[in-house]
Image (spheres, rainbow, N blue to C red):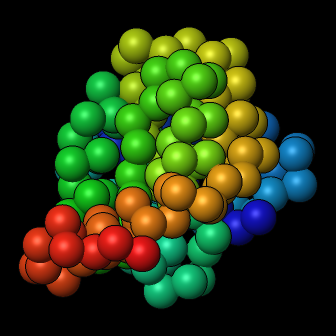
Amino acid sequence: MKIALGCDHRGALATQALIIHLKADGHEVELVSDMNGAMTDYPDSAYAACSRVARHDCDRAILICGTGIGMCIAANKMDGIRAALAQDELSAQLSRTHNDANALCLSADLLGHTLVKRIVDTWVRTPFDGGRHLRRLHKIEAIERGEDPSGLRS
């Protein structure tokens, strides 16, 4: 899987560890953030990573900032991006099975490196269930188009 990886300055250390982990697991990683230690604004990294997913240059994106919240808010402003903030393996799993999340947002401040790796492994390996969840994704797409989703039945 090709994964775009973005972070702000607070997520740099976790990102460095995650690059090694993902590559060891056979994934291709495209780092979109400057890792020189300078202050970095999370919306810039969220946009850079999620643009690659939206253009189908990468399969998914992983975004790391202090809490993960800012990255998640910024990523979800982009058409076609379904970003989920996960702080445990269950939320990572459900973000894939129910929501087909294509961007994972993580907290560098609240999660240790071991837990980050477990969350990422769960998220990367979990497929989308489809079925009844597909109808809900179509409703999210309607919202992106500025339409009322309540009229969609299929």
In which quadrant of the rendered view does residue 37 lie?
Answer: top left
Q: Nearer the viewer, residue 17 or 107?
A: 107
Image quadrant in which you'd find residue 131: bottom right
Q: Position of residue 15 (x, y in %)?
A: 55, 39
- In-image side of 9 versus 17 (left or right): left
Q: What is the count of numbered marks?
A: 0
For residue 72, side relative to residue 20 (left or right): left
Residue in the picture at 39% in, 36% down? 85
x and y, in percent, of residue 78 in the image? 26, 70
Q: What's the residue at 53%, 57% (across, down)?
A: 132
Q: Identify the image quadrant of the C terminus.
A: bottom left
> In the picture, residue 128 is in which quadrant?
bottom right
Q: Is residue 147 left or right of residue 60?
A: left
Residue 41 seen anywhere in this rendered image of the structure: yes
Q: Measured along the vertical axis of the image, is residue 122 above or below residue 31?
A: above
Residue 148 position in % (x across, y down): 12, 72
Camera sees residue 11? no
Q: Quadrant of the N terminus?
A: bottom right
Residue lying at 54% horizontally and 20% vertically, measured from the top left? 88
Q: Is 145 placed above or below 94 here? A: below
For residue 49, above or below residue 95: below
Residue 76 placed where, x, y %? 27, 58
Name the residue at 49% across, 15% down.
111
